[in-house]
Amino acid sequence: MTKLEGSIVNSLWPNIRFKKTKLSTIDYRLLTIFVFLLFNFVFLCGCQNKELYKESRVMMGTFVEVTSPDKEAPAIVFNEIKRIEDLLSKYKANSEISRLNKIGKLKVSPDTFYIIKKSKEFWQASNGAFDITVAPLIDLWGFTDKNYFVPNDRKIKNVISLIGTNKIILNDKDNMIEFSVSGMKIDLGGIAKGYALDCAVAKLKEKGINSCLINAGGQIYCLGDKFGKPWKIAVRDPRREKFSGYLELKDKAVATSGDYEQYFMKNNKRYSHIIDPKTGYPADSGVISVTVIAPDGLTADALATSIFVLGKEKGEMLAKKFPATEVKIIETRDVLEIEAKGVPWGHP
Ligand code: ADP
Ligand code: MG
């Protein structure tokens, strides 16, 4: 029990002792039972205040875990993430994104319009490193169906003409999205989870819930705090099956983009699922992991993906354009330095 709960229980005792002198034996027994029940009630209330509800579910291709002192929180979060996933997932045949990818022109919901508009802003800010039109390349490299494959240069060149967010036309008046080149496709995998968490957090706040931790496979949002203390987040070491440190956060989003979650190895070379839109090849900027802490999930998610493509120097310059944002970048050379000191750094 915490100090506060203890002080509530203690303050009850003097009154009860004072009444004891005026009671018969039977009353005394009843009072003892009453005090016992009261004590348990206060104790249980105290413990309940400290209780956390935790639920997880597979959504958006990952494990979504919700932790909150409010037992309504998980259902609210799952409902909202499902709503966003149904709109944006390229794996759902009926989603707005699947329909848009099929026909090349579609009037979309405000959510879909907003996230495509934000994606365009990140494309501009990142000088084209963040580009949702990489979808045909993601397919070509086999990341969509996990049937990994190194395509030849000719195949990559054929697809490159379909790439470029400048080829997406947005019309705010009627929420119409149109591709200017036929065969184009978009993939919101680098930004959608962050946006889904922002929507879930907005729903929680709307319902008066202000303490919740959402972890969608490393894409995290810490709403408020945990019983007055910041949420504690473990940070994974990108090359070893262990945690390398902790972050303590309140009202912040965290996103990590790395080459260790989705990748394949071919001839001793690692190919990650983040593609450099300029080359058509998996990004090879020397970065193996980027963690971004930002006030909202969308910014953290899109920035982490962008920085993975841009590399440390340009990536840090990009992050400076976003207020209240912190970035932690691990490069291959950091790993080599640690190995040189004799600490083994194996592949996960
Ligand atoms: P994760 O989805 O593992 O959390 P990211 O947020 O970094 O990791 O997103 C990676 C996903 O982003 C890829 O699976 C793909 O769908 C998409 N993507 C790949 N390259 C780019 C890029 N250059 N710009 C925008 N999105 C990308
Ligand atoms: Mg991302």
Image: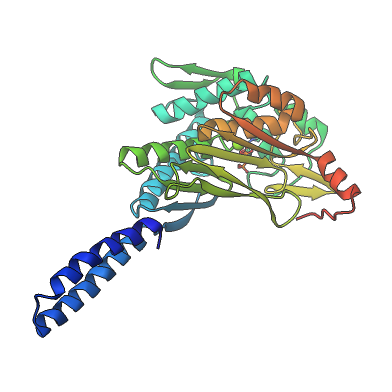
User: Residue at coordinates 18% horizontally, 74% vertically from top-left?
Assistant: 34
Please give left or right for residue 33 compared with residue 305 in the image. left
Please give left or right for residue 216 compared with residue 307 in the image. left
Vertical placement of residue 347 versus 128, above or below: below
- Would residue 164 be seen by someone viewing this image from the given angle? no
Vertical placement of residue 301 versus 11, above or below: above
Colour treatment of the image: rainbow
Q: What percent of the width, then of the height, locates residue 40?
A: 28, 70
Q: Nearer the viewer, residue 75 or 68?
A: 68
Residue at far bottom of view: 25
Q: What percent of the width, then of the height, locates residue 209?
A: 34, 44
User: Residue at coordinates 44% horizontally, 58% vertically from top-left?
Assistant: 54
Quadrant (top left/top right/bottom left/bottom right) for the C terminus:
bottom right
- Give residue 15's quadrant in the image: bottom left
Count of residue discs: 0
User: Residue at coordinates 48% horizontally, 22% vertically from top-left?
Assistant: 177
Q: What percent of the width, then of the height, locates residue 161?
A: 70, 23
- Would residue 239 be seen by someone viewing this image from the given angle? yes
Ligand 2 rendered quadrant? top right
User: Residue at coordinates 80% horizontally, 31% vertically from top-left?
Assistant: 154
- Give residue 299's quadrant in the image: top right
Quadrant (top left/top right/bottom left/bottom right) for the N terminus:
bottom left
Q: What percent of the width, then of the height, locates residue 170?
A: 49, 18
Q: Nearer the viewer, residue 315 or 97?
A: 315
Q: Nearer the viewer, residue 248 or 126?
A: 248
- Give residue 309's quadrant in the image: top right
Please give left or right for residue 23 compared with residue 128 in the image. left
Q: Nearer the viewer, residue 138 or 75?
A: 75
